[in-house]
Amino acid sequence: MKHGARNKIEATVTSVKKGDIMALAKFKVDTPHEMASVLTVESANDLKLKKGDRVMLVVKAIHVLPVKDA
Amino acid sequence: MKHGARNKIEATVTSVKKGDIMALAKFKVDTPHEMASVLTVESANDLKLKKGDRVMLVVKAIHVLPVKDA
Amino acid sequence: MKHGARNKIEATVTSVKKGDIMALAKFKVDTPHEMASVLTVESANDLKLKKGDRVMLVVKAIHVLPVKDA
Amino acid sequence: MKHGARNKIEATVTSVKKGDIMALAKFKVDTPHEMASVLTVESANDLKLKKGDRVMLVVKAIHVLPVKDA
Amino acid sequence: MKHGARNKIEATVTSVKKGDIMALAKFKVDTPHEMASVLTVESANDLKLKKGDRVMLVVKAIHVLPVKDA
Amino acid sequence: MKHGARNKIEATVTSVKKGDIMALAKFKVDTPHEMASVLTVESANDLKLKKGDRVMLVVKAIHVLPVKDA
């Protein structure tokens, strides 16, 4: 299967904590990988984002979709 | 500054492509790191998600927020 | 009222389960409808997405906003 | 493959329009299906959401992830 | 109509810029208002978030849904 | 630090309620500020969005990221 998303990161589950409705899963990522971000051109300009810059990529946990072989 | 998000990944910009409204930035991530996902307990159960599982973490690029030192 | 979103799907509530902070609502959708997705051109090309393709549209429940007549 | 998301809707691509960075794909959904929404308990209470209610489910197109057999 | 979302902010459009697929709209918000954030308990604890704290609320523009009287 | 997002709103925490996995924080925003929305051109056209329009900006609480000085 192919996914219409730029970020597909291989990971290993380290913990799963279940609440009443929502669960929080943690993963370790051991291998170098690529990531991609879509932002407005205005935001890219404000950041003066250019090749070689060191950045921090912030992602709320709710936006991370785990996919597993059946 | 501290961010109210579970995923904060150090990365290096490899390219920035600007369109009319939106831009696409690419990054390489060289260091092992942790990730976290919030999902419904139902989804966690459907996946039978447990410690040690190998998974793929799918994230649409629009959900990745680059943060840079001023 | 008009909403600045492409997907507006008529549905009937089948269950509501309330936790401490978050609730999970389920719906049935009985009528054929359209949907739309915005993705990067790169992702569309990787998928070789074209008219007539059968796909699965995956949406995390947190991104579904219920709207009800007052 | 199994996805850690509540909404997985079978659909047929009706059009794909590519811009400079982003693309817009349209789909038709012909078969009845279920949907799920996660919202705060406060929002569920404000809506007085209960079994049998007719609602409109609003989803921005950016949150719809197409998945296709390779 | 009632919306199953915590943030509903009255605003006036100041500009609309249309690209090929996506548009960027700007608004001014003149009246004091409330906002709400859902985050993991872990993130709230890391931030030591408590009544009276001054914070910055960061929201990507893609997550803002404009609604207008027909 | 600079954030690659259009909406950065100064606010004061009024309450924090913690559940098992997720927390709900409330804020007051006292100062006039700008906001931005990215939507499809199709949606902007459907709304006939133009300068001077009064709108309501709807944002699910999960999409609001609090950032605090360490």
Image (cartoon, coloured by chain):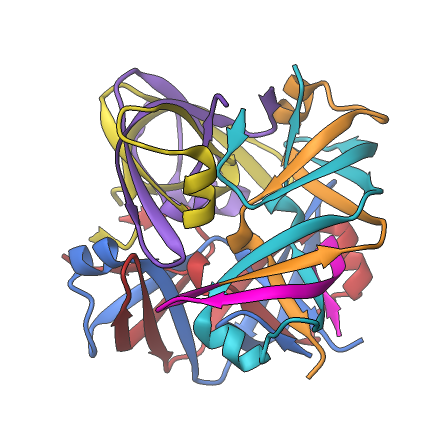
Chain colours: A cyan, B orange, C yellow, D purple, E red, F blue
Quadrant where the N terminus of chain A sits is top right
Q: Is residue D42 left or right of residue D1?
A: left
Q: Position of residue A24 (x, y in %)?
A: 73, 38
Per the rendered image, the range of residues in magenta is B1-23
Q: Position of residue D48 (x, y in %)?
A: 39, 38
Residue at point 85%, 42% (across, down): A30
Q: Position of residue E57 (x, y in %)?
A: 58, 70
Quadrant where the C terminus of chain A sits is top right
Q: Is residue F37 magenta?
A: no
Taking depth in this image into account, of A68 and A6 the one nearest to the observer is A6
Q: State whether residue A66 is above or below residue F11.
A: above
Taking depth in this image into account, of A9 and A60 the one nearest to the observer is A9
Residue at point 68%, 33% (across, down): B56
Q: Is residue D16 left or right of residue F13?
A: left
Q: State whether residue B2 is above or below residue C13.
A: below
Residue E37: quadrant of the picture: bottom right
